[in-house]
Amino acid sequence: MSTAFERWRAATLGPFEVRIFAAIWIATLVSTFGSLIQGVGASWLMISIAPSADMVALVQTSITLPIMLLSLVAGAISDTWDRRRLMLIAQAIMLVVSATLALVAWRGHITPWTLLAFTFVLGCGAAFYGPAWQSSVGEQVPRDLVPSAVALNSLGFNIARTVGPAIGGAIVAGFGPQAAFFINAVSYVGLIAVLSAWRHPPRERALPPESLGVAMLAGVRYARLSPILVAIFVRATIFGLMASAVWALMPLIARDLVKGGAIIYGVLLGAFGTGAMVGALTVSHLRQRLSNEWLVTAASIVFGLASIAAALSPWLATTMLALVGAGAAWVMSLSTFNASVQVSSPRWVVGRTVAIYQMVTFGGLALGSWMWGEVAHALSLRTSLIASGVGLLASVILGRWMRVPQAENLDLESMRKGTPALAPQIDIVPQSGPVVINIAYQVAVEDRVAFAAAMQELRRVRKRDGARGWTLLHDMDHPETWIERYHSPTWLAHLRRRLRLTRADQAIEERVRRLHRGDSPPLVHRYLERPPSSMSGLDKSEAELLGERAARTDPLFPGNATPPDRRTRG
């Protein structure tokens, strides 16, 4: 028994041995308490000023919709900027907005749409904070502890959810929603202090950061061309869409099905949080014994049955029991999705892939909150909950085509990290381009089918990392010769793409190269596209200036020691 306990402790609590992770975890726990208390205040205030089901559901939508709209921007900023600073700015914005909301509510100027506007802005702050916080886990703990750290972050959220809503219900019942908003504002102070004191090493950059637009497109392209991430995103979207009914309609479950008030609403949220805490404490242990697909399938079934049970139960005790199961299923599913995204993404793009995960998951929550609220308004609350539960049960069929993968053992370190690119022998600057790559392979006629299949997978990797215009050419006069051709818009983009090839991708390149015949490796040619008209006005002084600029740009031209006047001018 002692050995089993030690294994559980190492699998679950290992990240707490890292001091900065423990400090951020505790401060985040306090902040989460405040956010949940604020959420109880906002939902119950909406019931008192606009009691219809669709308006109550819009409170949840106003919080989650900004995450869907802004997460990709936030993820790109977190990958190209300082994550700690972005987290600080987001927390400061949320502090100011919460304090202003408390003041407006205290003075009695709140309206349904004013309340939704404030919760929307708070959601914007959460949208910018989330990707930076989640992707910074890899900077706080070693890679092998990332899944456990993600589960512990879920545990912290759900510890707060277990007690926070009940406290929030008591505060709202005793002092009004404005007190809940004020407590939320105060709760941000500790996290701001911890983040201000965090002195992590500056991120090493071999190349200048991408612009915001380029970074966003690169993140979307990487996610779209990664089958692992596509499977995770689809399953997370469906889960969020179907599971959102319980979240969005919880105040109405408390008022209409259980016949309670604000305190009962807090108790129901506490039951959900208790189950979520149990799920967070066991998911790392279960992940060592079950596949990710089995965990998500089981969680979908349990949550679907819990939603149906909550719809049919007229008693508080059975509703609470159903919500305990739903909470455990919620954390097991979402922490599995989240950890899978993080371990399936290299560090250069992890903020953006986490942001896309947040965007699709919370997009499903936002759309589902609105959709199930409309169903409840048009038909009935029970119909809405039963329909969402049946949808979750049916969603497990997706596992036949889109399994949640096991990606923990992927080696996503750059294969060429620390290996400088061969210096070009013509005068170029970072913005020179397009840069065209031709790779010549010699392939035996009997290996053509295997070569084509291997090149199809290599094509996906090249395009995922930023290659454009990829084509495969077959020499009509020399049947054993095949040419792989693609380009990058600039020399700087070529260097970025080159550094993105991971060690896990190396197996794909090796599979292609094993089919190459000959004693020497495939012949690689690099070309700079230059229309003749672009050279007509280039005099000697301009060419020398280009060469001097290239020679001075050390990170982009490593090992570039050839004097400009000895190079071939093109």
Image: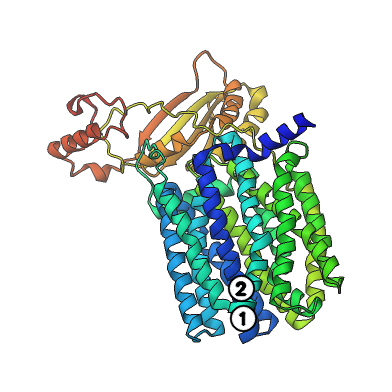
Circles 2 and 1 in contact, beta carbons < 8 Å: no
Q: Residue at x 52, y 53 (%)?
A: 27
Q: Amino acid at mark 2?
A: Ile
Whole-percent x and y of residue 316? 82, 70
* Marked residue nearer the N-terminal end (2 or 1): 1
Q: Report the side of 226 relative to 415 (left or right).
A: right
Numbered disc 2: secondary structure: helix
Q: Quadrant of the C terminus?
A: top left
Residue identifier under label 2: 171
Residue 119's label in the rendered image is: none
Q: Quadrant of residue 430?
A: top left
Q: Quadrant of the N terminus?
A: top right
Q: Residue at x 79, y 57 (%)?
A: 325
Q: Quadrant of residue 548?
A: top left
Residue 46's label in the rendered image is: 1
Along the line of sight, the residue nearer the viewer: 142 or 212: 142
Whole-percent x and y of residue 263? 70, 73
Q: Report the side of 415 relative to 540 (left or right).
A: right
| Placement of 30 over or under 549, stated as above or below | below
Numbered disc 1: secondary structure: helix
Q: Which residue, as the protein is rendered here, is positioned at the far front?
A: 174
Q: Amino acid at mark 1?
A: Met
| Placement of 148 over or under 332, stated as above or below | above
Along the line of sight, the residue nearer the viewer: 393 or 217: 393
Nearer to us of marks 2 and 1 is: 2
Q: Which residue, as the protein is rendered here, is positioned at the far top?
A: 519
> Marks 2/1: CA distance?
16 Å
Label 1 crowd (10 A; few <14 / some 14-19 / many >=20): many
Whole-percent x and y of residue 565? 17, 27
